[in-house]
Image (tube, rainbow, N blue to C red):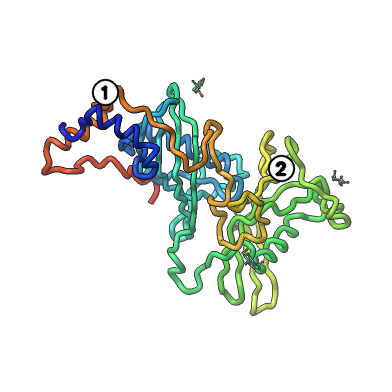
Amino acid sequence: MKSFIVPIWLLFVQLLSCKALPTSQKTLYQPLDCSAPEVEEAANQALNYINGKHSHGYKFALNQIEDAKTTQSPLGEVYKLELELLETKCHVTSPAAVETCPVRSKIDHAVEGDCDVKLLKTNGNFSVLNVNCKSKPDSAEDACVGCPKLAPLNNTQVLQAVEVSLSQFNSPENQKYYQLLEVGRAQTQVVRGTAVHIEYAIAATNCSTQEAKTALDSCVLLMDDAAEYGFCAGTVINDAVDQQVHVDVNCTVYDTQPGSSFAHTAHKDPSGAPIPHNQLGGPHHNLRHSDLGVGPLSSESASAEIPVVLPAGPIAINPIAKRSVAVAVDPALPHILPLCPGKKYFF
Ligand SMILES: *[C@@H]1O[C@H](CO)[C@@H](O)[C@H](O)[C@H]1NC(C)=O
Ligand SMILES: *[C@@H]1O[C@H](CO)[C@@H](O)[C@H](O)[C@H]1NC(C)=O
Ligand SMILES: *[C@@H]1O[C@H](CO)[C@@H](O)[C@H](O)[C@H]1NC(C)=O
Ligand SMILES: *[C@@H]1O[C@H](CO)[C@@H](O)[C@H](O)[C@H]1NC(C)=O
C-alpha cells in the first residue's frame, strides 16, 4: 500500500515543478487490461477511424492490442493504445465490411501496421484524438527460388502489365471506360520468362472505350454519386519460349457508393505536400503516407499531452490501481497478471 500513497505536499511540489520539468514530469497513465471489453471497443473505434481515413491500398484488420493505458483529463478518460494491424485483401474502395475481408497470409508477404492511438471517452463514447501509424510488408522474404517477389508499385514491368491487362478489360464496345486509380500490389516471378502478378483499383470515366481511344485527355473520372470503382487481379506473362504475351485478368466493378470519393485524395509527405503516385517507390501503400492526422476533438499538436486532473485524494480510486496493490502484497509474484499484450486475432 505504502508506495501508492503520495503525500499531499509532494503533489503540490509536482504541480509547481510541472512547468520547470516538462519532459521528466510526464502524464501518469494507469495500465489497462488489453482484453478488457472497453479496450477492445476503443481499439475497434480506432480501426474504423483508420480505415475511414486511409484512402490508398487495402483495409486493415486488428491483429493484436499490444498495450493499453488510461489517464483522466478535464474532458474525460484518455486511452492510449498500441495496435498491431494486418492488411486485408479488400481494397479501400471496396464496399465490403472489413470483418468480412480475409487477411493476407504470411507467406504472401503480409503487411503489418503499427499504430499509436489516443482516444477520448466521454459519456461512454470514444472519439479519436490522434493516430500515428506506419506499416511494412513482412520480410518472410522469398522462401523459395522462383516464388513471386513483391515489386515496387512504380516498377516499369508492373505498370506495363497493368496497362496491357486493363486494355483487355476495357473491351471496344464498353460504354464505360475504366481508368487506373492505383496499383495496390505487384509481384514478379521468373517462369519461362517473366510473370507479373498485379492487383489494382480502377475508376469509371465519362467516356466509352471508343471515345477514350480518340480523346483520352478529355475523359474524366465520374464523381460523387456517379463515382464507380472496381478492382482487378491479373497475371501477365512474357513467355520467353513462345515469344507471346499471355494476359489473364479478372475485374470486379463495385456498385456505386454515394458519398465516397477516392479520386481526390493523395499521399502526403511530412510537409503536407502531395506525393505523386508513380513516385511511391515501395512495394506497398504505407499507412505513414496516409493523412490520418488528428481526430475532430483534438485542439493540440500530435505530440502534446492532454492535461491531467490529479485525483482529489492521495489514493487513486481506480480498479487497476487496486489490482496493482494486490500484486504488491506478494512481492514473490511480480507481474503475475498478464494484462498486455492481448490475444492475437490472426498470427
Ligand atoms: C454516443 O454514441 C451514440 C451512438 O453512436 C449516440 O447516440 C449518442 O448520442 C452518443 N453520446 C454522446 C454523448 O455523444
Ligand atoms: C467528360 O467530361 C469532360 C469534363 O466535363 C468533358 O470535357 C468531356 O467532353 C466529357 N466527355 C464525354 C465523352 O462526355
Ligand atoms: C480469374 O478467375 C478465374 C476463374 O475464377 C481463375 O481461374 C483465374 O485464376 C483468375 N485469374 C487471376 C489472374 O486472378
Ligand atoms: C519509383 O519511385 C522511386 C521513389 O520515388 C524512384 O526513386 C524511382 O526512380 C521510381 N522508379 C520508376 C521506374 O519510376
Type of amino acid under label 1: Gly
> Quarter-wise, where is residue 159 in the image?
bottom right
* Number of marks: 2
SS label for mark 1: loop
> Quarter-wise, where is residue 284 in the image?
bottom right
Residue occupying the far bottom of the picture: 241
| Residue 268: image location, x then y, percent | 62, 51
Question: 249 and 271: which one is in front?
Answer: 271
| Residue 225: image location, x then y, percent | 73, 35
- Residue 106, placed above or below residue 342: below
Q: Mark 1 points at which residue?
A: 313
* Ligand 2 within 8 Å of the CB at mark 2: no
SS label for mark 2: loop
Residue occupying the point 40% across, 48% down: 346
Name the quadrant where ligand 3 sits.
Answer: bottom right
- Along the horizontal axis of the image, is 280 left or right of 303? right
- Along the horizontal axis of the image, is 340 left or right of 302? left
- Along the horizontal axis of the image, is 48 left or right of 175? left
Q: Which of marks 2 and 1 is in front?
A: 1
Distance CA(mark 2)–CA(mark 1): 59 Å
Residue occupying the point 46% across, 29% down: 126
Type of amino acid under label 2: Glu
Q: Mark 2 points at which residue?
A: 228
| Residue 152: image location, x then y, percent | 59, 64
